[in-house]
Amino acid sequence: MIFSKKSSARIDPARFVEVVDGNNRPLAVLDKDMAHRQLLRHRSVQVLVFNTDKKIYLQKRSANKRFFPGRWDISARTHPHVSEASADAALRVLREELNLTVEHTQFVRTLPACAETGFEHISIYTLPRNTQPITPNSDEVSEGYHFSREELTCLVKEFRELLTPNLVTLWEAGLLVSV
């Protein structure tokens, strides 16, 4: 017997990602850390939350985060669980990180996996006119703030070291504006 009965213990789905090919087709399931270490293509979902004044909500990542702790990042981001639809992952991450429960988000676009995206096929969604209060999950987010386009431009130009590379990449691509 290859597996003992003990091997049927519950596996945390958040630890695994689908490794994908250049066309975003699944090839294998692998531990998320291993996929990152080996620079393998995989999926991520990112959600941009704007208020009614068209200001974008940025989160300051928890000091406990493995990558870029304490840096400002986009509103919410996650890796889809194995076989989870990107749209469902967008709703999940809003609940888990910002305590926002919404029925749907708006798809913006997909960015192909490359070095600039951390080899992640990124599906970008937006919540264009959020009126709900945001209550960050302190395990994930240390604080948050709504930034105007001018404030965000100043942050990127003058304080880049306080931001995640992902945030800068999306700003440079012109994707951090309300639709």
Image: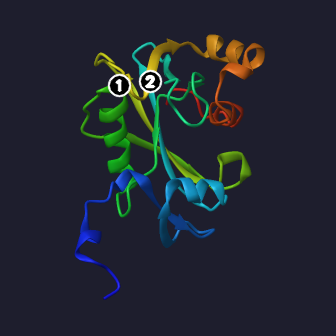
- Where does residue 17 sit, x and y in percent of width and height? 46, 59
Quadrant of res 2? bottom left
Residue furthest right in the image:
158
Residue nearest the observer in this picture, 30 or 87: 30
Residue at image location 36% in from the left, 64% down from the top: 83
Q: Which residue was labeled with disc 2?
A: 141
Name the amino acid, label 1: Asn
- Where does residue 154 sit, x and y in percent of width and height? 71, 12
Residue nearest the observer in this picture, 89 or 66: 66
Q: Which mark is residue 2?
A: none
Labels 1 and 2 touching (C-beta < 8 A): yes
Rendered position, 110 above or below 139? below
Q: Distance between the Cα atoms at labels 1 and 2?
A: 6 Å
Residue nearest the observer in this picture, 67 or 161: 67
Residue at image location 50% in from the left, 50% down from the top: 44
Q: Is residue 87 left or right of residue 109?
A: left
Q: Is residue 162 left or right of residue 18?
A: right
Residue at image location 44% in from the left, 24% down from the top: 141
Residue nearest the observer in this picture, 75 or 124: 75
Name the amino acid, label 2: Val
- Where does residue 172 sit, x and y in percent of width and height? 72, 33
Q: Residues within 10 Å of mark 2 (few under 14, many from 20)?
A: many
Figure quadrant of the N terminus: bottom left
Q: Which residue was labeled with disc 1?
A: 137
Quadrant of res 73? top right
Q: Secondary structure at mark 1?
A: loop
Q: Secondary structure at mark 2?
A: strand
